[in-house]
Amino acid sequence: MSITIKNTEDITKMRIAGKLASEVLDYITEFVKPGISTDEIDKLCHEFMVKEQGTIPAPLNYAPPGHSPYPKSVCTSINNQICHGIPSPKILKKGDIVNIDVTVIKDGYHGDTSRMFYAGEPSIQAKRLCDITYECMWLGIYQVKPGNTLGDIGYAIQTHAESNGYSVVREFCGHGIGKVFHEEPQVLHYGNKGFGEELVEGMIFTIEPMINAGKKDIKMLPDGWTVVTKDRSLSAQWEHTILVTKKSFEVLTVSKGTPLEPHLFKS
Ligand code: MF3
Ligand code: CO
Ligand code: CO
């Protein structure tokens, strides 16, 4: 298989799926505070998707080769968890940071997005990690235009993360997306300028950097899904689904509650 180029109809439907995914995050925002369990977050998101939106939660029973079916409707990754945290009875406590990753299917098309949330006031270090990771995602997005390469995206992300003393997770990456949840290309969050596949109008893929406060090494928990930092340092992640347009990019996972772009070049 190779990278699919989306047609007008695909793009229209991907805009709808992307907006719906983002609206799940808007909906859950007010509930994310100390005292709620990640199971409750999952349940609320599940009901909203199925009952209010008429969408299908793509993670539920998702079973890529070598994996047991994913048992929940969203991923909730807390503190030192990097990604694919499985919702559980575990209760969020004051100062926790949590990534909620939502993928919906609407009319056969996928929208995939995640944000970081704070349960109460985060530590200065935790907030800084979340902010820099958000900037990393956007610096990757700003590289998206025809003629640039996947390596340009990875380079921009890696440079910003490492110049702030952080590290980039290597084992997981962004991905092409459409009628299929994970398709080509793999969008690495590290790399070299000018290397890798050239971007072409009509490609759609996610950019979803996982940035660790400590070392880049990961560990898989016995549940076969939850990925944590080997050194137990904090990790953050943000994700958007992006369309390559004629001149630049369009973020498809947008809704009323989408956070503003970062102020990157303030002096
Ligand atoms: N939403 C994740 C991504 O960004 C994938 C989650 S797969 C699951 O690609 F099975 F863990 F839900
Ligand atoms: Co994704
Ligand atoms: Co995702």
Image (cartoon, rainbow, N blue to C red):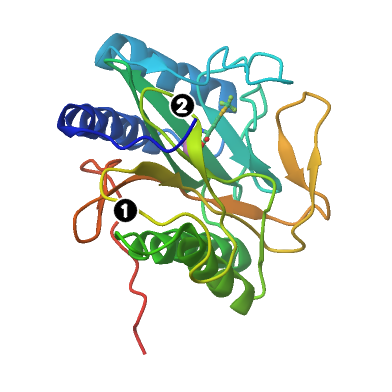
x 65%, y 13%: residue: 69
As drawn, the residue found furthest toward the bottom would be 267
Name the kind of residue labelled 1 in the image: Pro
Ligand 1 under 8 Å from disc 2 Cβ = yes
Indicate the quadrant where residue 36 lies. Answer: top right
Mark 2: give few (<14), some (14-19) or many (20+) Cα within 10 Å: some
Residue 199 is situated, as x and y percent measured from the top left of the image, at 37, 54
Name the kind of residue labelled 2 in the image: Phe
Numbered disc 1: secondary structure? loop
As drawn, the residue found furthest toward the front would be 1
Q: Disc 2 versus disc 1: distance between alpha carbons?
A: 24 Å
Mark 1: give few (<14), some (14-19) or many (20+) Cα within 10 Å: few
Numbered disc 2: secondary structure? loop
Number of numbered markers: 2
| Numbered badge on residue 41 | none
x 38%, y 23%: residue: 104
Residue 7 is situated, as x and y percent measured from the top left of the image, at 21, 33
Residue 252 is situated, as x and y percent measured from the top left of the image, at 27, 42
Q: Which of the two marks, 2 or 1, is nearer to us in this view?
A: 2
Q: Is residue 167 left or right of residue 209?
A: right
Residue 190 visible in the snapshot: yes
Residue 241 is situated, as x and y percent measured from the top left of the image, at 36, 42
Q: Which residue is mark 2?
A: 181
Residues tagged 2 and 1 counted as in contact (Cβ below 8 A): no
| Numbered badge on residue 259 | 1
- Quadrant assignment for the C terminus: bottom left
Q: Is residue 119 above or below residue 102?
A: below
